[in-house]
Image: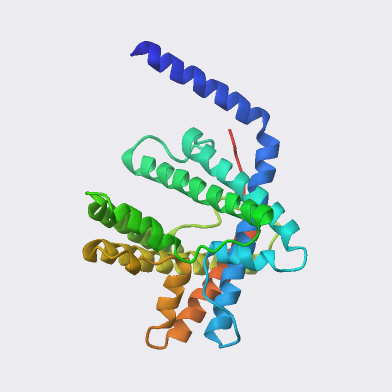
Amino acid sequence: MTSISTHVDTARDHVEDAVREAGPALKWLARLGFVAKGFVYVTVGVLAVQAAMGNGGSTTDQRGALRTILHQPFGRTMLIIGGTGLVGFAVWRLIQSLLDPEHEHGTKPKELLRRAGRFVSGIAYGGLGVAAWQMVLRGESGDSGRAQDWTGSLLAHPAGEWILMVIGAIVVAVGAWHIYRAWKVKLGDKLQLDRWGAKMRTWIIRFGRAGYAARGIIFCIIGVFLILAARHHDPSEAKGVGQALQYAAGMSYGWLMLAAIAIGLIAYGVFQWVEARYRRIEVC
């Protein structure tokens, strides 16, 4: 047992040394990742606002936003930069999860859950970065049924319903945490905003709160429908981001709900740009 522990510590030391040497490049990539995230969420939000106002937009998810960017002037170049940034952001998230360079997540159960959240975030944004590169190399790809596809695969397993129900509950919990964070958490603690006046700092934080609230609502909708898909053993009930926005649009005064969420997503994207410039980033 002692030998295994020694090997683990040695491997960790080697990883930390490698991360320390690559620190400046990783910080730069993490900031580029914030920029890419900002463009993705602003694109999703703008398209949803246009849909709410009947101006030809559409409700879509992050991959749909990447496809929209691909069709813009210099779209391939933008996706190359964005895909690189998203992969860099994913690496930074994984470093946060595994090495805890900012010393904010210890080993208590609650803190381990947060580190697990960082890990999942890293995997998700890594996948988004890979999708961006695939679009550059192979062209546009259709992913409209992705939520239903993986849900159907999961439900085909004996314990799939229970696993999917747990996943749905976790997604709802993540959404609730985002809404709580929008209301209570001090979002500016890691931002170096001293150069800005008090009024501008207040507005920056408001943009962040609006963004987290919008993401929280979307996560809650997605999580609830995953639970329903599990209960009814029906993968067609599962929804991704774009379909969650469509559901919001179908509610009473749905255009108003959709517009509010969309504006929140735009605000979140803008907040990501602020983080790209002013966030304190540690890698080791």
Q: Is residue 83 left or right of residue 96?
A: right
Query: Looking at the figure, which quarter contains the C terminus?
Result: top right
Across and down, in percent, residue 160 comes to 26, 52
Position in image of residue 66 (x %, y %): 62, 62
Residue at left offset 51%, top offset 81%: 259
As drawn, the residue found furthest toward the right would be 74
**Left or right position of 45 against 149:** right
The residue nearer to you, when weighing 207 against 56, is 56
Q: Which image quadrant is residue 213 in?
A: bottom left
Q: Nearer the viewer, residue 114 or 258?
A: 258
Instruction: Say above or below: 237 vs 257.
Output: above
State which quadrant residue 90 falls in. Answer: top right
Asked if one can make out residue 5 in the rendered structure from this viewpoint, the answer is: yes
* Residue 89 horizontal/vertical position (percent): 59, 47
Q: In this view, which residue lies farthest toward the top?
A: 3
Position of residue 124 in the picture relative to residue 72 (left or right): left
* Residue depicted at 38% across the width and 42% down the height: 111
Q: In the rendered picture of this protein, how many numbered marks are placed on residues? A: 0
Residue 211 drawn at (x, y percent): 52, 67
Q: Nearer the viewer, residue 229 or 203?
A: 229
Camera-side residue of 224 and 183: 224
Query: In the rendered view, would you say 140 is above or below 158?
Result: below
Write the residue at 56% across / 21% down.
14
Can residue 278 be seen from the camera position used here?
no
Which image quarter is the N terminus in? top left
